Amino acid sequence: MIATTKKLLDEILEAMAGFQKVGLVGCDGCAKVCMTGGADEVAAMAQELKKQGKDIVFEATPERTCNVVKAHPVLEPLKDKMQDTDAILVLGCGGAVQVARQLTEQYGLFKPVKSGLDSVGHMDMVVAGQVALEQCQECGECILNDTAAICPVTKCAKSLLNGPCGGSEEGKCEADPSRDCAWVLIYNRMKALGEVEKLKKFVAPKDYRKAAKPRTLYIKEGRLA
Amino acid sequence: MKLTELFQRKEFVITSEVGPVKGCCRNGQPEFVQEAKSLKDYVHAVNVTDNQSAKMRLGSLAASVLLKNQGLEPVFQLTCRDRNRIALQSDLLSACTLGIDNVLCLTGDHLRQGDHPTAKGVFDIDSVQLLSIARSLNQGNDLMGNDLTQATDLALGAVVNPNFQPLDLQLLKMEKKLASGAQFFQTQAVYDVRLFETFARKTEDFGVPIQYGVVIIKSPQMGRFINENITGITVPQWLIDEMAAASPEQYKDKAVEITTRLLRQIGPMVQGVHFMPLGWSDVIPRVMERLRSTCQCGG
């Protein structure tokens, strides 16, 4: 999922300054899981903005606002209401904000679209409802087959490919001692799997063309450009 | 002079380290140059750290050239933290062009401990890859295989941390560095002689010169500070207690005594020593004089 955190209310109010009539779009996908932009958080934001003297024209929470397949059927019927707003506030990831903006343009509307959240990474829920971890940064050249299914590109603070730096102590990371050293985790698992020898292989510098932004995926062809 | 030539001649190679100043050096001679000059008769070369601890300073290449101009042999430290593969290669070409003979290839401390913690770390290349790239440049090709008009001619050093647990994982990386072109190693600071003995035993078949690294502990407070704040080094309680038993004006004498003792014990296991005096460079001549009078190593 794309993890999100809430922006401070002051920052949101600053972005919404001068806009009286507001439309609210949440996301019942990742933002719901992060408790930042599901239907409940959208309702709470509506209350807060009303308290601040704003008028809420509509509230909507598509199942996946980043996906036009899910967002369009929910937002298209709200075209007239969108027309009636001064601005739209999206409680979703950066992708959700931009898909919402794209749809407003598609509907022939030129409304300010603002973000109420900060996107903080592609994360995996590892403790239900409590902890999400960043474990993959979509480098386009997955090496998990060679690293016991633990990603050093993401989980090593220095993205080292050929083993640990010298800063790790008692299995913890130099950059953040509350975190495990990814390479100690990889080594221990490779050892348990009887595959330590494989770690001796030189890993060449990554081809960062595969991670160069912005990437486009042509789904039917499975082609990345 | 390349350190590799000294190792080949079976010299016990002695290096120290200075940290470039946080500021420009257009006028006057900065303190780190004076510090390095004071060691001229006692060390073969002086490492120049590269924005050490991720604190922004005068560049290690410019500082290395300043030392070279004073007749000192610099070991240019080059980290992967702040440069992508183009900048790293370009700096290696620049270093050789400016007369540098020795380069120490490192990953670099993480930005979080530095004075620009909001900066974006580069880490495009790791230290093993950097060694491999530097070796290619020595052979006349860049990373992409393109020909150079003139190859570099640099002795390539690397670092290893014998304190690392599990040690075999650190040694696995050391072997990769060796296979990628490392010609000598400098170790992280070690104060546990037994631990170093284990490391030395496990690496003796590698056939690569190793310099024992030692940070001069200046006070019991510094020892405790390192244990609490610097990862990868452990200052043992005996050393902290020994310093604490001395009065503050005796700390330097104590540092000389402890460092000499460590070198007497560890020196015979290695091919050289790398001092990290952190400003207390005047300790080094005293240590070396003591060693010369009593021990064949260091002579």
Image (spheres, coloured by chain):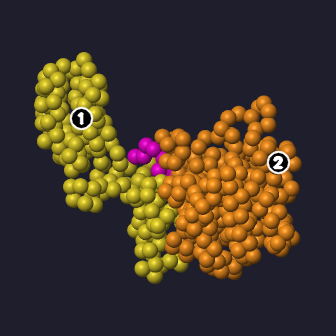
Chain colours: A yellow, B orange
For this orientation, the residue located farthest to the top is A18
Work out whether disc 1 and disc 2 sit on a shared chain: no
Label 1 element class: strand
Is B242 left or right of A194, judged from the image as shown? right
Image x and y of residue B139, in percent: 77, 61
Tell me which chain the residue with mark 2 is part of.
B
* Residue B37 - label: 2
Q: Say if the magenta span includes residue B240.
A: no
State left or right for residue B71 relative to residue A72.
Answer: right
Nearest to viewer (mark 1 / mark 2): 2
Q: Chain of mark 1?
A: A
Instruction: Name the residue: 76% across, 67% down.
Output: B272
Q: Which residues are magenta?
A: A208-216
Q: Tell me the residue that label 1 is attached to.
A: A90
Q: Secondary structure at mark 2?
A: helix
Any part of residue B132 in sight? no
Residue at image position (23%, 24%) is A87
